């Protein structure tokens, strides 16, 4: 298993759709493509959509297949996880997909102000301990970072199997007067008409927890 991870980690560094940002680089000038994603990488003016904590990139690749008129970037610290989505994109010659291997903490050193149109947060670690509230990807410390890179009126989507995390995020939205656009604590039982990608694309963790009987929660809000 360790050898397989090392092999994937090494291979992902050779993919032309993968980029790495270290702590030292984030404190200096940031990612070289910052502010240049459309002109130098995607070479179009289409909207840019991020998946934060993308894992194997199922959502990044799934959305990119459905929406070829948008650009998608998955972000995760684990290179051996990113490998799956990156390799799929390379093999299928998907020019609207990229991946960044870095910490979410450094996200605003990867993009310039207003460069991103939407953010997806799919099944993040809920960090249930009270001492780890600051590590939750929907606390205001992170949301303020997202604001730095989102266009005015930019959207954030959250999918989670953890209802306390869903409730925590709703409280953050309410307390900080953010714009709540959609919310359900049982996506698959809710009859509201939504984009079919919400239920047709499933990450590894969504499949796992759905099979165990967990309800899937969804939020969409503006910052």
Image: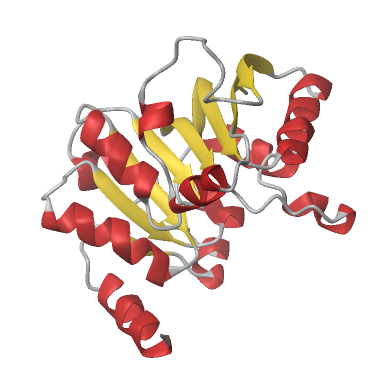
The reply, left or right, for residue 28 in relation to residue 163 is left
| Residue 209 shows in the view | yes
Q: Is residue 12 above or below residue 41?
A: below
Q: Residue furthest right?
A: 130
Q: Is residue 61 above or below residue 156?
A: below
The reply, left or right, for residue 25 in relation to residue 93 is right
Q: Position of residue 43 (x, y in %)?
A: 17, 39
Residue 138: image quadrant is: top right
- Seen at 65% across and 54% down, the residue is 125
So how many labels did they put on this image? 0
Q: Which of the image's four quarters has the C terminus?
A: top right
| Residue 35 shows in the view | no
The reply, left or right, for residue 31 in relation to residue 140 is left
- Seen at 84% across and 56% down, the residue is 129
Residue 12: image quadrant is: bottom left
- Seen at 52% across and 11% down, the residue is 191
- Seen at 63% across and 19% down, the residue is 183
Q: Position of residue 109 (x, y in %)?
A: 51, 52
Nearest the camera: 216 or 59?
216
Q: Which of the image's four quarters has the N terminus?
A: bottom left
Q: Position of residue 19 (x, y in %)?
A: 34, 62
Nearest the camera: 141 or 126?
126
Q: Is residue 78 above or below residue 92?
A: below
Q: Is residue 122 above or below residue 151?
A: below
């Amino acid at each position: 298993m360790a050898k397989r991870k090392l092999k994937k980690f090494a291979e992902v560094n050779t993919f032309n759709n993968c980029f790495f940002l270290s702590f030292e680089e984030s404190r200096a000038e940031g990612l070289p493509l910052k502010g240049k994603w459309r002109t130098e990488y995607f070479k179009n003016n289409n909207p840019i959509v991020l998946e934060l904590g993308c894992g194997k990139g199922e959502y990044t690749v799934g959305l990119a297949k459905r929406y070829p008129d948008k650009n998608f970037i998955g972000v995760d610290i684990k290179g051996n996880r990113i490998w799956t989505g990156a390799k799929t994109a390379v093999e299928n010659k998907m020019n609207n997909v990229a991946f960044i291997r870095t910490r979410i903490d450094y996200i605003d050193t990867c993009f310039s102000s207003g460069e991103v149109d939407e953010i997806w947060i799919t099944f993040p670690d809920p960090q249930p301990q009270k001492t780890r509230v600051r590590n939750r990807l929907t606390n205001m410390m992170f949301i303020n970072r997202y604001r730095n890179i989102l266009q005015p009126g930019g959207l954030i989507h959250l999918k989670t199997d953890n209802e306390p995390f869903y409730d925590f995020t709703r409280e953050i939205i309410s307390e900080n007067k953010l714009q709540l656009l959609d919310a359900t604590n049982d996506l698959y039982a809710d009859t509201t008409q939504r984009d079919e990608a919400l239920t047709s694309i499933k990450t590894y963790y969504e499949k796992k927890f759905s099979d165990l009987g967990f309800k899937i929660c969804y939020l969409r809000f503006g910052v």
